[in-house]
Amino acid sequence: MDFAHSPRTQDLLARLTAFQEREIAPREEPYHRAMLAGPDPWTSPVPPVIDELKAMARAEGLWNLFLPPGATLAGESIGAGLSNVEYAPLAERMGRSLIASEVCNCNAPDTGNMEVLLHFGSEDQRARWLAPLLDGTIRSAFCMTEPDVASSDATNMQATATIDGDEVVLNGRKWWSTGIGHPSCRVLIFMGLTDSQADRYHQHSMVLVPLPTPGVRVERMLSTMGFADAPGGHGEVSFTDVRLPASAIVGGPGQAFAIAQARLGPGRIHHCMRLIGLAELALGLACVRAGERVAFGKPLANLGGNRERIADARIAIDQARLRVLHAAWLIDTQSPDALGAVSQIKVSVPNMAQGVVDMAIQLHGGAGLSDDYPLGAAWTIARALRLADGPDEVHRGVVARLELARHGIGRWAPSASSSSSSSSS
Ligand SMILES: Cc1cc2nc3c(=O)[nH]c(=O)nc-3n(C[C@H](O)[C@H](O)[C@H](O)COP(=O)(O)OP(=O)(O)OC[C@H]3O[C@@H](n4cnc5c(N)ncnc54)[C@H](O)[C@@H]3O)c2cc1C
């Protein structure tokens, strides 16, 4: 396997790096300050800088980089056509900023939702929703997790998507619906029970719900360890007798689990790619702080075990990057080992990033926990990703089952696994 950057990646990475340093970096802190200063994150206007940066990124060809090779819309080629190995360094670079992914239209949950539409949407669904999502003019949400049931086992889902003639009727309550608070959120993908008599993995459907639609109500916005994550945020959403034409179902009734499997693989590895960048950001800040600040007559870097901590962080990041590239290569080569590899990195990378950011916070002293540095937000992102897209334990379960099966113990049937269909952002 060869993880050298392809000429396309080299070119895009150089341009993306320059763009982030020149255009995004000087605007990022003022943007976060403006978001924090508003009286209410859900009613304050979104600073126009994101849309301005989006227009610049698009003009520079740094747009929709996540789209897989061969992606088309209405017969036209779309996206950069990069393999996962090619995309990984770019996602990592975007991960060094808290806004770059959105600026380049490569942010969750929109990327996952776009992939659902790309691979499973009807022509009408793609024209109505994929086109504006690719343009970055609307945003979207994915509604799978429910407050009332343990959603790491997605077969627990209680919300319903009932077929009634040529309509589908939605009822239930979802939460942790990322992006639902964004003023431009115009569509969500709802996952619900359609046929309780079908086999366990063909009972649920995915339905495209335009916003606003009568019966859909954002009950409240959640905070993540005190962070609003505005303007997109994470919401609790109720669905009461929401009636839509049956043509709003993606891929046909009962197909939700198959689609979720396809959606979650790329979504999980993209999170891991970005987290490597986030860990690099934290390590860079830690090194600068450790070099510049003096205590007991020495730079912090020369005190106690701080050099070892910095070295351990470098080792951990580099190991994680290689594991992510390996998983990307397994996906690109359609290896059956990709499933286990993605579950492995979905455990190891958020834990690695959480540890590195935590070390950086510690080296910053009290400043590390203040809004003067992005470390508190970075730690929260890494911590949240030990739950979002399936908790660590569920992915460890996948890895363990595959390992035991290698030794002839237990039976492994990917299509019958609840664990790889855990809720997602
Ligand atoms: C920031 C953030 C964003 C999110 N975005 C979205 C989104 O956009 N859309 C969406 O639908 N969901 C989203 N989620 C929800 C997320 O996917 C779920 O929280 C996650 O799948 C776990 O489901 P649960 O919260 O119901 O936990 P539960 O299922 O109640 O599990 C709780 C705990 O039980 C333990 N556990 C569960 N299964 C096992 C097992 N097999 N072995 C051992 N222990 C186990 C684990 O410790 C687990 O953390 C998001 C979550 C967060 C934090």
Image (cartoon, rainbow, N blue to C red):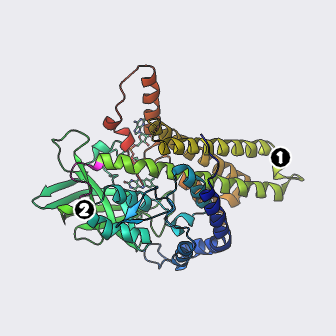
Q: Is residue 221 visible?
A: yes
Q: Position of residue 180 (x, y in %)?
A: 38, 66
Residue at mark 1: C-beta within 8 A of ligand 1: no
Q: Is residue 301 left or right of residue 256?
A: right
Of tags 2 and 1, the one toward the viewer is 2
At horizontal 24% and vertical 39% (from top left) the residue drawn is: 200
Q: Earlier in the sequence, mark 2 or mark 1?
A: 2
Q: Position of residue 326 (x, y in %)?
A: 56, 41
At horizontal 29% and vertical 42% (from top left) the residue drawn is: 155
Name the one closer to the observer, 124 or 42: 124
Q: Is residue 117 left or right of residue 283?
A: left
Give the spatial CA distance, label 2 vs label 1. 56 Å
- Location of the C terminus by quadrant is bottom left
Q: Position of residue 408 (x, y in %)?
A: 41, 19
What is the quadrant of residue 119 in the picture? bottom left
Numbered badge on residue 303: 1
Q: Is residue 165 left or right of residue 308?
A: left
Hey, what amino acid is under mark 1?
Leu
Residue 408, placed above or below residue 392: above
Numbered badge on residue 388: none
In magenta, the rendered stretch is: 248-256
Hey, what amino acid is under mark 2?
Phe
Local crowd size for mark 1, using a 10 Å CA cut-off: few (<14), some (14–19), many (≥20): some
In the rendered image, the residue lying farthest to the right is: 297
At horizontal 28% and vertical 62% (from top left) the residue drawn is: 208
At horizontal 53% and vertical 73% (from top left) the residue drawn is: 58
Name the one closer to the observer, 60 or 423: 60
To which residue does mark 2 refer?
Answer: 239
Is 66 magenta? The answer is no
Local crowd size for mark 2, using a 10 Å CA cut-off: few (<14), some (14–19), many (≥20): many
Q: Is residue 235 visible?
A: no
